[in-house]
Image: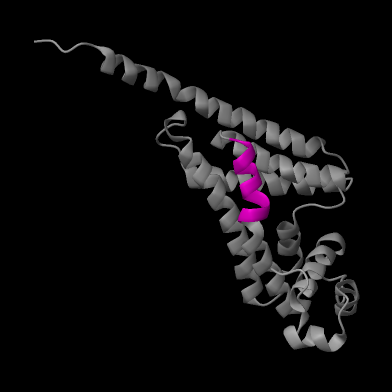
Amino acid sequence: MTPDHPRDRIVNAAMDLFWRHGYGATSLSQIREAAGVQGGSLYHFFKSKEQLLEAVLDAYLEQMEAVLIQPIVERHDDPIERIFALLDGYRQLLAGAGTALGCPIGDLALESGAEPAAVGEKIAANFAAWRGWVRRWLEEAGARLPGDLDRDGLATLVLTVMEGGVMQARAHHSLVPFDASVAQLRDYINRLLAEAPPARRRTRMRRAQPRRG
């Protein structure tokens, strides 16, 4: 995206306003004013509010790796810690906004259920990409986790913990439910990690035994 281009200014303004005030509560005139464009410019690029919402969802998906994932990869070598750094990023969003703001995609998913199917598909694509990164990190953990672990299922659980923790934190105006949810996930993953090392030790012991005969 190019911040100075009118279309991108409109999309960026919509992203911010949808996140802060909700999709339904945000008008096109508010977006136009925030973007600093004329009404004709807005309608030149987007024929409807729904079309603008689709562009917002496309932008979230396009920016996910650079904005959300890459900084975590650069800070953490351990793939398991990358997962918890991702969750901590959402905690920081909650803390910074006094639990008033949460996951922008989750909010749009809850609010836009009656929107066209294309919107639902784009929301699902964002969630799938998020889960895909968690799944990738679980794969990178390799033999540290049990071999029969359903990594797809665990990646889905991580997303559910995040979204559910955000919703409860906002409902209770407290980070306690979010922290409790992440702590339980951490405990579960620690238990999974504890299952694998003995098998690795036995493998190394077998390899260390001299050949006979």
User: Going 62% across and 63% down the picture, which residue do you hit?
Assistant: 62
The x and y percentages for residue 65 are 61, 54
The x and y percentages for residue 34 are 89, 71
Identify the colour scheme used: one colour
Closest to the observer, 9 or 32: 9
Classify residue 185 by image quadrant. top right
Q: The N terminus lies in which quarter of the figure?
A: bottom right
Answer with left or right where residue 183 lies relative to residue 36. left
The x and y percentages for residue 89 are 73, 44
Task: Give the number of marks.
Answer: 0
162 versus 59 height, above or below = above
Answer with left or right where residue 118 lies relative to residue 101. left
Classify residue 210 by image quadrant. top left
* Residue farthest toward the left in the current orientation of the protein: 213
User: Going 86% across and 40% down the picture, which residue do you hit?
Assistant: 174
The x and y percentages for residue 28 are 85, 78
Q: Is residue 113 magenta?
A: no
Q: The C terminus lies in which quarter of the figure?
A: top left
Which residues are drawn in magenta?
65-76
Q: Main secondary structure of the magenta part?
A: helix
22 versus 44 height, above or below = above
Closest to the observer, 30 or 180: 30
Answer with left or right where residue 141 lies relative to residue 162. left
Taking the image as drawn, is residue 41 in sight?
A: yes
User: Going 86% across and 45% down the picture, which residue do you hit?
Assistant: 96
Closest to the observer, 200 or 154: 200
